[in-house]
Amino acid sequence: MADTPALTSVTNHIGGADVPAVSGATTRLIDPATGRVNARAPLSDAVDVDAACTAAQAAFERWSLTTPAERQRALLRIADAMERHADDFEAAEVADTGKPPALFRTDELPAIIDTVRFFAGAARGLPGSAAAEYTPGRTSVLRREPVGVCAQITPWNYPLMMAVWKLAPALAAGNTTVLKPADTTPSSTALLARIAAEFLPPGVLNVVCGDRDTGRALVGHPAIRLIAVTGSVRAGQEIAAAAAADLKRVHLELGGNAPVLVYDDADIDDAVSQLASLAFYNAGQDCTAATRILVHHRVHDAFLAAFAEQAGRQLPGAPGEPDAAFGPLNSAAQLGSVRDLLNRLPEHARIVAGGSALSRPGFFHQATVVAGVRQDDEIVQREVFGPVVTVQSFADETEAIRLANGVPQGLAASVWTGDHQRAMRATRALDTGIVWVNTHGTTVSEMPHGGVKHSGYGSDLSLAGLLDYTRVKHVML
């Protein structure tokens, strides 16, 4: 294969070709580290969406009949090509997000490529029940089949990772897809589509760039049979309502607001060290970020002092700044949202670390710790999605669980304790889709990633994620 050069401008990818929006309309891509325009991307409308869905529908007839081995080979070749183009993916991702290049290269990209390879193998291992006779003279067989054309909408916090989490299982199961990346971060997804075109039939993977109206056109297109979205609770509610009109299947990974339970028998030094890094990773723009730390009253003050001190060492900075622990927020709007929440803090809350935006170009904000909050405070109940952590005190296990579960979201949580039985009680009682013990935030391709309550339903990653892109057919002989 000849090396595919990095994109110099972002395009849609429809039917195997890189194309602009038919209307010629574009949006500006802003470098969040400088606040300056660094590229343009298509502003797709219903015409572009229809072209992409039509291409995906036509390709489905052939792709759905490929063998699992054929789909595996295609995905493995895509993964190998992604490794070869690591520099290009790094440049595209960093340009759109402003995140530290080394963190993307060492933390994110290897895991992204591993996800593609996992689903390549999983394509050949779909589970099923044995054929059997449940009534005399009749044999029943279950078939697992692809759903059809999938609409996939991804967020701006981890653009390439979220694209792969959606695309890899859909393609492995034999579906075709039309993916709309976030309007501020389409570059790495567009590059992926361009590279993948070397190994996929035209129309199997399509990318349309655009805004919310583009997404609405995609969700409403009659060719779509499944909609998968990672985004806000508001977006998920709107998409689920729209999908109901045509009985489309919906897969939602929404907001987080993860609680962290630190008991008095925990290794406090280890908890502070790990959480200070994990809470502010990616500027806190992570659905599983350790955002609400609940600490036993006996160790609350010591933990808070140590954590605030460590938070002060987590410095924001632009790509290339060696001391930067995290980059800017995604946009001026997101920075404004964080500032508004902090400006509305009630009188009883106090900022013990950080608290300010940086006076420099770009959308940077200090790592911030807020103490003295109460359960019904806005900053506790809402997902901040920025480098802001609240710290609360609890008296006993019962109160810890009540505070942890006392928010609308239920994606992830972690428990920090030296007592195995206590850890098991907490993991059972926490109303979330993911629970870590004495660690936080680690994901692996083999395990599901999904939530409950307002954090949505359906799983990314794992065999469960692959099964979400299939339907079951009973055949009786």
Image (tube, helix red, strand yellow):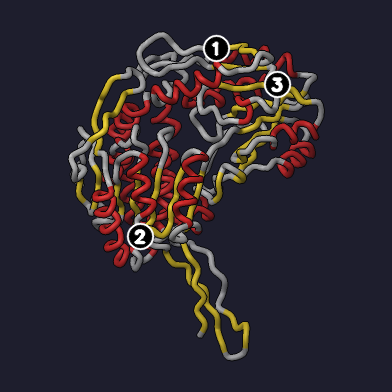
How busy is the neighbourhood of tag 1: few (under 14 within 10 Å), some, or many (20 plus)? some
Q: Position of residue 297 (x, y in %)?
A: 78, 21
Cα distance between the residues tagged 2 and 3 = 54 Å
**Crowding near the residue tagged with mark 3, few <14, some 14–19, many ≥20 C-alpha atoms within 10 Å:** some
Mark nearer the viewer, 2 or 3? 2
Q: Which kind of residue does numbered mark 1 sit on?
A: Gly
Between circles 3 and 1, the one closer to the viewer is 1
The residue nearer to you, when weighing 440 against 51, is 51
- Residue underneath mark 2: 222
Circles 3 and 1, Cβ within 8 Å, touching? The answer is: no
- Mark 2: amino acid: Pro
Q: Which mark is residue 354?
A: 1
Q: Which residue lies furthest to the bottom in this view?
A: 137
Q: In the displayed structure, does residue 138 sit left or right of residue 169?
A: right
The image shows residue 147 at horizontal and vertical percentages of 42, 63
Q: Mark 3 points at which residue?
A: 268
